[in-house]
Amino acid sequence: ETGVTQTPRHLVMGMTNKKSLKCEQHLGHNAMYWYKQSAKKPLELMFVYNFKEQTENNSVPSRFSPECPNSSHLFLHLHTLQPEDSALYLCASSQREGNNSPLHFGNGTRLTVT
Amino acid sequence: AQSVTQPDIHITVSEGASLELRCNYSYGATPYLFWYVQSPGQGLQLLLKYFSGDTLVQGIKGFEAEFKRSQSSFNLRKPSVHWSDAAEYFCAVGPNTGGFKTIFGAGTRLFVKA
């Protein structure tokens, strides 16, 4: 049990589909993050939420739409994706804002866009 | 600009041998420094962190890292590698002035041979 749970673990979707990734943290943290991990590339920060408010959108295309209904849940809504969006999507949380608070990661959702 | 460099894409060591993974960073002040490990099919797990004080920090699973300001380095070491240490290792840097952005290196994949 990592404390950060992501579902589904694997997702295959067509370019015209709409799907959502879910993340839940059981650590009482106040900040949540979406990262994209592609082969042979550094982790890319996509979105940050602090106390349910989005504080970072790292120039992510609008086909990715995050939602944070409360401090424990984070969603990533996907629509009209491209094959290059295939990657491992990692959710993370941290206790508070500021970088002396380590990130706690979920196991990720492996997304394949066909 | 802030950056993290892990010069080695992959390293192979024999079981029982010592290990050193290199990390260099670029930042104008003393950063917060982290090492994370990612096993196949898993998210990232924090190994250790450095914020201030003693420049040699101990982490989980027998790992340690040394902060060297003069070399802008934060190398990860382990005296005797076990087969279960085979994974990908990420160095990360966070600014000490606050903010959410943790910058990750591209990772070093460790292979352990019997």
Image (tube, helix red, strand yellow):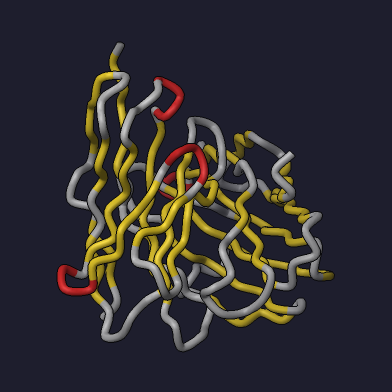
Residue B32 is situated, as x and y percent measured from the top left of the image, at: 42, 72
From the viewer's perspective, is B104 left or right of B44? left
Left or right for B94, reference B12: right
| Residue A67 on image: x %, y % | 73, 68
Which residue is painted at 38% across and 44% down in the image? B89
Q: Where is residue B24 in the image (x, y as percent from the top left)?
A: 22, 62
Closer-to-camera residue (B108/B55): B55
For residue B59, above or below residue B111: below
Name the foreground residue: B42 vs B79: B79
Where does the image place residue B41, in percent across and percent down from the top left? 54, 32
Q: In this view, does B20 lie to the left or right of A100?
A: left
Q: Judge whether A22 appears above or below B41 on screen.
A: below
Q: Is residue B83 above or below residue B54?
A: above
Which residue is drawn at the image coordinates 24% and 36% (left, top)? B10
* Location of residue B33 (image quadrant): bottom left
Q: Looking at this view, name the residue that lies furthest to the top.
A: B114
| Quadrant into which the N terminus of chain B falls | bottom left
Residue at 40 percent across and 20 percent down: it is B83
In the picture as drawn, the residue positioned furthest to the bottom comes out as B97
